[in-house]
Amino acid sequence: MTDVNYDNIERYLSGSMTDKERHHFEAELDENEDLAQELHFYMYVNQSISECLYHTPIEELTFGKAKNKDQLDLGRIKWIALIGIGIIFGAMLFWSPWKIYRQIDASAVQMGTVNTEGLPVGNKYADIIQLFNDGKYEEVLPLLNSALTEQPNDLYIRYYRGLTFLNLKYLGSARRDLLKIYTENTPQMYDAAYYIALSYLEEQDDYKESARNWLDKIPLDAPIHSKAEALRKLL
């Protein structure tokens, strides 16, 4: 949890700081990214709550009480809302954003109908393609294994078996297949690097440094680079 003084944020936005305090706060904003993010988040929440509360007729909020009591109640409501939103964001962080990212991304991959040489394989592997694209990884794995037993050098099948292992959380096996794709300089080599990085983020221990190392291997001109950068920001 970052050490952010929320009273200073409130005083800065309300204009109650002295000139010296304001200059010091703004200088800290330039150097402290966490503080800047909290300030922007606070501004967003404050605006959203204000739009909700202050567009409600004051009579509905006061129930006949004095105006200064209304203002106090509104302030309390605002802080309660801020705390509630903070709890929600904390829960999101607790669930590890990179795990959410992997579940969305790795399982969303669809098996193509052309191999690494650009040749159509739809008829040959129709059952495999159908099961993989339906997300039936436990069912498709034996078929992928059989296909690789017959054709051990089939990098097309090996790539999708690596993704199948990843979705089943057989992480060591996933990395072995994907490493083969990467070292063979196939068209999917940087995709393989990306999914190897994801596999490290699925480990029980902290392998974020290993994940970063694999993300670093993905060049700017790789189609998957934007996803790699998005994932890097979650680390």
Image: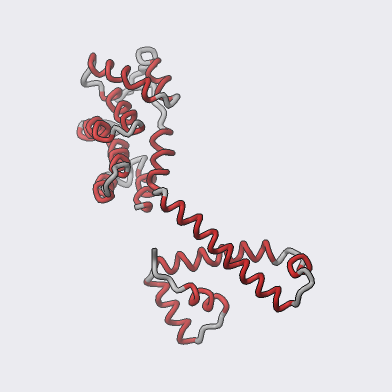
Looking at the picture, the colour scheme in use is: secondary structure
| Direction from residue 123 to residue 148 in the image, left or right | left
Tell me where residue 26 appears, x and y as whole percent: 44, 77
Viewer-closest of 95 and 44: 95
Q: Where in the figure is residue 197, as x and y percent of width and height?
A: 29, 42
Q: Is residue 227 left or right of residue 209?
A: right
Q: Quadrant of the N terminus?
A: bottom left
**Snapshot quadrant of residue 117:** top left
Total marks placed: 0
The one nearer the camera, 51 or 192, is 51
Q: Where does the image place residue 69, in percent across and percent down from the top left?
A: 70, 76
Q: Nearer the viewer, residue 213 or 171?
A: 171
Residue under the point 50% across and 60% down:
86
Q: Image quadrant of residue 34?
A: bottom left
Q: Residue at x 31, y 20 (%)?
A: 144
Q: Is residue 126 above or below residue 110?
A: above
Q: Residue at x 52, y 83 (%)?
A: 17
> Depth check: 204 or 219 in front?
204
Q: Quadrant of residue 72?
A: bottom right
Residue 165: image location, x then y, percent: 31, 30
